[in-house]
Amino acid sequence: MSYSDKMKTMYQEQLETIKNAGIFKEERYIHSSQAADIEVEFPTGSDLKKVINMCANNYLGLSSHPDVIKAAHTGLDMRGYGMSSVRFICGTQDIHKELESKVTEFLGTEDTILFPSCMDANAGVFEALLTSEDIMISDRLVHASIIDGMRLCSAEHDTFKHSNMEHLEQKLQLHQNKRIKMVITDGVFSMDGDIAKLDEMADLCQKYDALLFVDDSHASGFIGKTGRGTHEYCNAIGKIDIITTTFGKALGGASGGCVSGRKEIVEMCRQKARPYLFSNTIAPVVVSGVLEVFNILSGNTERRDKLEKNSDYWRKGLSEAGFVLKDGDSPIVPVMLFNAKLAQDFSKDLFAEGIYAIGFFFPVVPNGQARIRTQISAGHEIHHLDKALEAFIKIGKKYEILGLTKQEIIAKYGL
Amino acid sequence: MKDLILNYVINEYQEDEDDEITYETPLISGGFVDSFSMVSLKVFLEKKFKINIPDDKATPEAFDSVNKIVDLVNGYTK
Amino acid sequence: MYTNFQRHLLKELESIKDAGLYKGERIIESPQAAEIVLSTGQKVLNFCANNYLGLSNSKELISAAKSAIDTHGYGMSSVRFICGTTDLHKELEVKIAGFFGTEDTILYAAAFDANGGVFEPLLTSEDAIISDSLNHASIIDGVRLCKAKRYRYENADMEDLESRLAAAQEQRFRIIVTDGVFSMDGNVAPLDRILELAEKYSAMVMVDESHSAGVVGKTGRGVTELFGVKGKVEIITGTLGKAFGGAIGGFTTGKREIIDMLRQRSRPYLFSNSIPPMVAAAGIKMLDIMSESNILQDKLHKNTEYFITGMINLGFDIKPTQSAICAVMLYDAKLSQEFAARLLDEGIYVIGFYYPVVQKDQARIRVQLSAAHNREHLDRAIAAFQKIGKKLGII
C-alpha cells in the first residue's frame, strides 16, 4: 500500500509522452456484431456512427455468421457455459477432442492440442520442446507472441533477414553443431501481408536437419486453394513439423488457438506446455462455434474464393489510384504512408468518411514504415470496397500523396 | 574494428538496398535492429573481440550506431 | 527433418511415464456441474472443478451469453485496440472495478495473460519484485519476462518477506506479489501484515485473486475484503474462468495510471484477441447476481464448513484453510493416486496431487467445494472418503 506520488507521477509522465508522440492507443466502442458494416461510438460519448470495417481479422466473414451463432446457442444448451478447470483436471469435454481431430484433418497434420489463445500456444511451445542445447532461428518479422515464447525458452536464438533464404542458410550453417535446430516463421506476415517461402524453407530444413515451425494465424482458412494455409499455398503439406494457429481470426474470431503437427510434439506439449497446464480450457460455447466453422469450410471453397476476388479487386483499385502498397498475395493490404502522424491523421479522416481503418507505426512496425493496414473480408461486397476506395482517394488527394513514390512521400512528410 | 562492425551490421541487418547504413545511422531508433536481434549483435561482439558486455550496459542507446558500438567495445577491450 | 527429434521426444515421454507423471485426460460429456457424466457413461460428483459458485452451468449466465451472441455476434476477430472493443467490454471493466473497489480494470484473454503481461510494462531493471514462493506459474512467467530484480520469500512467511524487503531498498520501486489463496493448500495470504510491511518498506502490493474472488470474504470480494483492506492494494489480478462463470477471460484491476499503462504497453493485451462479447455479457450478469444477493457466497461458505468438519471428525488430516479448497493430506504419492482412483469407483471425482506439483512427501487429494453441491452430495463424498480411508487404513 505504498503507491507513492513518485510512482503515480512517473506513470502519468510516461503516458503524457506517449500522447504527445501521437501514438496513444484509443479504443473505439463497437455496439454491433463484427461485420463489414459496424456501429461505432468514437470518440467516447458521441453518437453511434455506421462505418465500413476495413481492419478486422474477420477474413472469411464468419464472426457473426448465422450458422456459427446457432451453433453457439446449441453449444450453450448442450455443454453449458464454462468448465472452470484446466484441461487435465476436469476441463476436457468430448467436443474438445472432436475439435482437435477436426483441426488435424483440416491442416493435414498428425495431432492437435488446443490452447486458450494462439498467443498462449506460441508462449508455451518452445519451452516445452527445447533446452539450452538447442537453437531457434527466427524470421525478423515474426509475431510478438513468438518472441515472448522464445524469451521464455532457454534455447539459444538467432534471427535471419525477413524471408531471405540465403541468410537463413548462412545461419543454419553457423549453428550446424547444435543438437536441435528449429526454423521459425509466420505463414502470412501480419503487418506486410507477404507469404513465407515455406517450400524453400522446408528444403533447407531437410538439408540441414532442422525442424520447421509456422504460425499460420493470418492464413488458416483461406490461404491456399482450399484454404488449408500457407503450407498448401507453398506445396509443403506434410513438411511442416509444427503449425500454430488461432480461432480468433478467420475461423470464427471468438478465442482459442492450437499447436498442430507431429504426434510426439503435440503429446509433449500436453505434458509440459505451461499455458496448457496452468490456464483454463476453451469454453464449450467457443468450441461449438469453431466446430461449425469447420463444417462450413469443409463443404466448399466459396468464401475463400470470394475473399481472394475481393482482395485482388481492392489491391488493384488502390494501386491504380497511385498509393504505395506492400507487395503480397493475401487479404492484408498495407497502404504505406511512412510518417506516423500522417498515418494517424489519415485514419481519422477516413473515419469521418465512414471508413474504419487503423494507422500502424513504431513499435508495431519499424520506424519510418508507418502505414494504414487494410484487411479484406469475404463479408465485404463490391459496394463496400468501392465506397472505401472512394474515401481513400479523397483523403489521398487531400494529403497530395497519390502517384508519389516512397521517396517523394518521405520528402514531403518526413519519417 | 570500425569497418568490421559496420560490415557485420550491413550484412546482418540491411533489408533494403535503398537504405544506406553508415557509422552514424541510428540502428535501433532507425528500425534496422530490433531489441530482440540486439542480443545476437551482442553475442557477435563478445565472441569477436573476446569481451564481456554486462547486460545492464547493453542498452538500446549504447547499440544505436556503429560509432556508439565502437565506443562500447573499446570500454571493455582494455 | 524430424527423425532425430522424434527419437529424442519418444525417449523423454517414456521417462515421464516411468516417473508416473504422465497426465492423461478424462473426457466429460456433460456441462460442468456438481454431477457430471464421463465418457465411460459413469455419473460422478465433481469435487475438482474451480466452479466455486456453481455458475459454470448457470441458466442466467447462459441466457446472458445468448442475448449477446444475438446482438454482438460470435467473435470480434480483433485485438482490443484495433476493432475488438464493444460497449460490453467497457461495461464489464467498470463493473469489475466497482466490485473490488478499485479505480479501473483491463480485460485479458485469461488470468494467465493478465499475470504474464503486468510486470514488464510497469517495472524496469531499476525495480524489484518480491514474490511468494508458492505463487502461480503465470506470475512466475510474468516475472521472467520482466527485467526487475527478483526476490523470493517463503510461503506467507512475514519474517522472510521483511528481510527481502530490507534487502531490496536499493531499488527504485518495489512490489510484493502474492496469490490471495494458494491453490494447493487453500491458505490465504496474510494481507494485513503484508500491507504493514509494504508501508514500512515503501512497496506496492499485487494480489492474484483467482482462487479467492467470489469465494473469500463475507460477500466474496476476495482477500482484500477478508482483511478489511478493500481498495488498499495497488494491483489485483483475477479470472473469469473459475468462480466467475468458468468460461475464459482474466483481468487486472487497480490504480488508474497503472491500468492506463497496461492498455498502452501490455503485450498479451496488445497482441491477443479481445474476449468474445458473450463472455463479457455473462461476466456483467455474474457481477449483477453477486451484487444483488449473497446466496451463493453463503452457500459456498456453509458447504465448505460442513465438509471440513465432517472430514476432521472422521480423523482426516486437513490443511488449515480459509477458502473453498480442502487439502486432504496423504503424504505418499502412490497412496494419493490409489485413493483418488478408488473414490472415482465410488462416484466421487477428485485429483491426487504429488511432487513436483506439491513438495516431496506432501501428496494429497485436493477437494474443491462449490455452491452447486447440496447436502446429499457432501454426505456422499464424506461417506466415500470414510469407506476408502478405512479400507486403506488412513483413519
Image: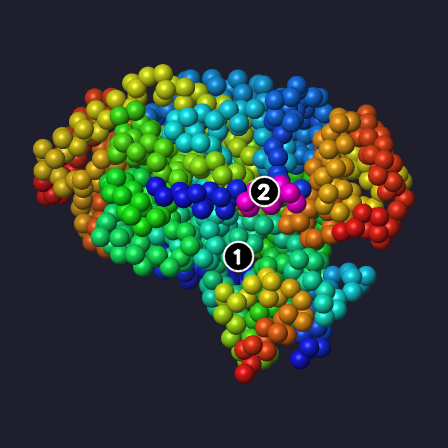
Who is closer to the viewer here, A266 or C231?
A: C231
In the image, residue B36 lies at what x, y percent?
58, 59
Mark 2 vs mark 1, foreground winner is 2
For the N terminus of chain A, the image quarter is top left
Chain letter of mark 1 equals A
Q: Is residue A109 magenta?
A: no
Question: How many discs mark residues in the rendered view?
Answer: 2
Crowd rating for badge 2 (residues with CA inside 10 Å; few <14, some 14–19, many 20+): few
> Is residue B3 shown to the viewer in this render?
yes
Q: Which residue: 61% across, 32% down?
A: A27
**B48 to the left or right of A81:** right
**A226 to the left or right of A248:** right
Amino acid, disc 2: Glu
For disc 2, the marked residue is A16
Asked if labels 1 and 2 touch by Cβ distance under 8 angstroms, the answer is no
> Is residue A98 shown to the viewer in this render?
no
Crowd rating for badge 1 (residues with CA inside 10 Å; few <14, some 14–19, many 20+): many
Amino acid, disc 1: Met
Mark 1 falls on what kind of element?
A: helix
Q: Earlier in the sequence, mark 2 or mark 1?
A: 2
Q: Residue furthest bottom?
A: B78
For disc 1, the marked residue is A150
In the image, residue A249 lies at what x, y percent?
62, 37
Kindly report the distance in space between the C-alpha atoms of the residues bearing marks 2 and 1.
32 Å
Q: Which residue: 44% across, 20% down?
A: C285
In the image, residue A219 lies at what x, y percent?
67, 43
Q: Is residue A15 magenta?
A: yes
Q: Which segment is the magenta one?
A: A13-21
Quarter assignment of residue A56: top right
- Relative height, residue B39 to residue C377 (above, below): below
Who is closer to the viewer here, A305 or A161?
A: A161
In the image, residue A320 lies at what x, y percent?
89, 40
